[in-house]
Amino acid sequence: MLQTQIVTVIALVIFAAAMVGIGIYSWRKTQTIDGFLLGGRNIGAWVSAFAYGTSYFSAVVFVGYAGQHGWNIGLGGIWIGIGNALLGCLLAWQLLAKRTKVMTTTLNAKTMPEFFERRYDCTALKIFAAVVIFVFLVPYSAAVYKGLSSMFSAIFPSVPNNVWLLVIAVLTAFYLVLGGYVATAYTDFVQGIIMIIGVIAMVIAIVNTEAVGGFANLMENLAAVPDNGDGITGAQLTSWYGGSSLKFLCVNILLTSFGTWGLPQMVSKYYAIKDIKAVKQAKIISTVFALIIGCGAYFVGSLSRLVLNNQMPDGGVDSIIPQTLLTALGDPNIVTTIILAVILILLLSASMSTLSSIVLSSASAISVDLIPEVKKNYNPKNQMLITRILCLVFVALSYIFATTNITIIVNIMSFSWGIVSGCFIGPYVWGIYSKKTTKIGAWTGMIAGFLTVMGTTIVLTCMNLGAADGVYAAFKLAASKAPEMGCAAMAVSLIVVPIVSAFTPKFSDEHINNVFKN
């Protein structure tokens, strides 16, 4: 273990130095708010695609989703990775990127709330969207912290978990505050390369363990896994269609794939890309990236029962992947130690890229969208300084939230995805496609998506109070339905926007022509 810790520390120091260097280099390119948030709308295809992909796949995907779903579903969980690539990347870029790039440039919108304001001529809509982003992306970012810290704690058991949370927060805050979106995009590119190398190394290492038996024997060994009391057998684990978990599998594919369509930190990548030619290239690059990362993560998760001898780790589902990696790579030789260090940097890269995207979206929601409406004598010259300060504040809030005793990282992330994307997906998608979408239609879609998740969560929590030990336990039971609630919220938002728009006052021809003039 000592050798593993030494090599890991060396790798972390090199990685941290690279991230800090990129932050310092990017400082000169972020002296305007447009440069800080969007890189001057001049980011190339490869960097944009990797920024999208690394923001998509955080440590929560590896430690939370891949661990829990791989353990319970088996090989069928790989369909989540495939769905993320085809629906969350390929189809999203195909349908949304070009129109978003053109319209946000026409409207000079730097953020999603600002887009809503100018598309629907409604400042109140911008304020509501900004509040939703700032409030509900905090638990999302906290889930990112928690997912990564599980792996650090497994390698450094004597170091308090909060220390690693603080290291992640400080490092992310440093390069983000210095370099904004430019630093984030270029660090994402480096981190994306690390993630690809790490996933390939992880798959090869896990498959070649004695318990798995290589590619030739893994199906046979997985099929022989007995029921350990949780009702899961080899028949379930080797089913390519999810077996008895087919419905659950489909819900998670829908949530994690279409959820990105309404998340501001994902949509912003379309704002910042250089041109339409770059959009076409980024579509393919991000899809291939997602296939490698997503399928690799869920594939490793599906083999975790073999590596762990079908015994759930003491830390529960959030410890499945960390313990799988430590068990498989625990031999004290330099090769396995280096592989483990690379995988840890992979998880760090995945988390920091997602966290920085969330922080930028949240900070801008306040500095660009909310404060100018509340403080009428707001000086735009102070916007850059305030945005940087808010980045620090948001990282701090996320850190504080992450240090609380929350262990349901998958459900917390699903809850955040569901409520944010459920609010925005309808007004956003219909807003870039349909000239008939009205202000009232957008408001209805946003509120309906919000209430679908929040209302259902409150009702389920109250219903569970009698059977649960306290409010948190009751919420934990309610949060287990977060994927279903998120899918329902997105569907409701997409459905009600055009229906309500058909019966409510339309915008003037002048406004529509200004919005859709390109």
Image (tube, rainbow, N blue to C red):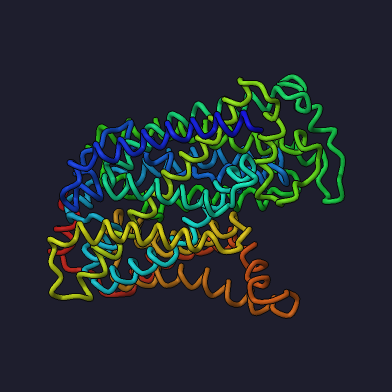
Q: Nearer the viewer, residue 281 or 130?
A: 130
Identify the image quadrant of residue 108.
Answer: bottom left
Instruction: Report x, y in % for residue 510.
Output: 12, 64
Instruction: Report x, y in % for residue 327.
Output: 72, 34
208, above or below 139, in the image:
above
Residue positioned 23% across, 76% down in the render? 374
Residue positioned 52% across, 68% down in the render? 453
The reply to whether residue 491 is in sight is no
Identify the image quadrant of residue 375.
Answer: bottom left
Instruction: Report x, y in % for residue 459.
Output: 61, 77
Residue positioned 17% across, 41% down in the render? 28
Numbered disc total? 0
Identify the image quadrant of residue 78.
Answer: top right
Q: Is residue 388 left or right of residue 205?
A: left
The reply to whether residue 337 is in sight is yes
Q: Nearer the viewer, residue 124 or 158?
A: 158
Quarter holding the N terminus is: top right
Q: Is residue 283 left or right of residue 457?
A: left
3, above or below 153, in the image:
above
Q: Nearer the viewer, residue 474 or 261?
A: 474
Residue positioned 81% across, 33% down in the render? 223
Q: Is residue 107 left or right of residue 134?
A: left
Q: Is residue 352 left or right of residue 148?
A: left
Instruction: Report x, y in % for residue 57.
Output: 49, 42
